[in-house]
Amino acid sequence: MNAPLKTTPLNALHRELGAKMVEFAGYDMPVQYPTGVLKEHLHTRAAAGLFDVSHMGQGAIMGDAPAAAFEVLVPGSLQELKPGQTRYTLLLNDQGGIRDDLMVTRPLGDDDFRTLFLVVNAGCKDRDFALINERLGTSHQINRFEDRALLALQGPKAAEVFARHCPEAATLKFMTAAKLKVVGFDCYVWRSGYTGEDGYEISVPGDTAEDFARKLLAEPEVLPIGLGARDSLRLEAGLPLYGHDLDETTTPVEAALTFAIGKRRKLEKNFPGADIIMDQLFNGAKRKRVGFRSPEKAPAREGTEIHSKWGEIVGRVTSGGFSPTLNGPVAMGYVETEYSGDDYRLLANVRGQQRALDVSPMPFVPHRYFRG
């Protein structure tokens, strides 16, 4: 018998707003609202969209030097994090495969040397926190923030809108965070997001989340946005999705995420799968994550086989769909490295026909993060 779906603190509000609800990572989540995915996507690119991402896992590692302790599981140089700085990193297995990708923050405040905030993917959060507790629990306390909601306000008008409720947030730069008072609520605020746009992710107490969301949705620039547009926005931004573009059989080198491997860590070689990953860094990996554009109208969807002009299978699409911003299909996936050069023409079997698929640089739509 299937377990009942979990709900976020905004579930009733989603239904009030007419959202179409679907199962995602064990949660009852809005995939779109009556405005539809296309309009939600374009509105986020033009103004500001509000996303419920409360299904994500929030937590903290607490104790002496938590950044140094956590480095046994990830390849990032976390000890160099400054107070208020956030970093993208990867949980790895012993073969260098990606268990999950996550955000790590060293908070500002009296306990900034004894606390490390984590935000992990919804579908992985239970096993992530179990692994962290198994490896660090004897020396550190692992706290899960089950009573908090997480909202993302994204788009070129996001900073303008948020400044009306929290002027201090305007000073934050991309990948920085602070504990701020927002419309009377104590919030953790990150200047980050997964759309390629400027914006914020805001952690609020669960029992205040609906009131908080209503205040933001009352702003004329803001519309509620569902998972459908969230997926097309992140695809345009060239951002991989765990469970689709990343998994435990994929290394950071293959996934084109080598920026997540710290310089010091490359020298120390003391993270999981270091020998395999370092060999790939020096000698190359057999496959690589790349972007694809096509002159055709029909998009190549996840699972589509990619062929060379000689008919050999050389890769597979892991995410693909229609780009509302570019008015055409885009995709990402893995191909054998010899076929990964920009503008290399390959073929994909789309709707029973061989269609042209050209390797293309990512992001497809330029990032507009605020770096100050």
Image (cartoon, rainbow, N blue to C red):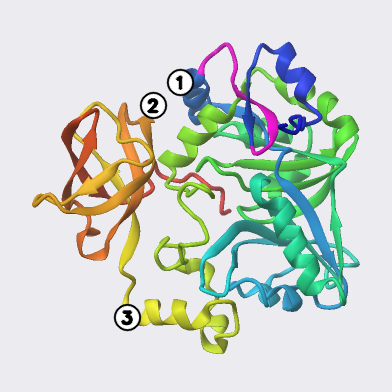
Magenta-colored stretch includes residue 206 = no
Element type where label 2 sits in the image: loop
| C-alpha separation, residue under disc 1 versus residue under disc 2 | 6 Å
Which residue has dot 3 on it?
Answer: 283
Which residue has dot 1 on it?
Answer: 38
Q: Is 313 placed above or below 73 here?
A: above
| C-alpha separation, residue under disc 3 versus residue under disc 2 | 38 Å
Q: In the rendering, at what x and y percent does residue 68 appear?
A: 73, 78
Q: Is residue 64 visible?
A: yes
Q: Which residue is drawn at 56% across and 48% down?
A: 370
Q: Closer to the camera: disc 3 or disc 2?
A: 3
Disc marking residue 65: none
Which residue has dot 2 on it?
Answer: 324
Element type where label 1 sits in the image: helix
Q: In the rendering, at what x and y percent does residue 115 appear?
A: 83, 66
Q: Is 356 placed above or below 92 here?
A: above
Q: Is 129 placed above or below 36 here?
A: below
Element type where label 3 sits in the image: helix
Magenta-tinted stretch = 25-36
Under mark 3, the amino acid is: Asn
Q: Residue at x 80, y 73 (%)?
A: 136
CB under 8 Å between discs 1 and 2: yes
Q: Is 311 placed left or right of 209 in the picture?
A: left
Quick one: label 1 or label 3, which is nearer the N terminus? 1
Give the quarter of the figure containing the N terminus: top right
Q: Is residue 106 visible?
A: no
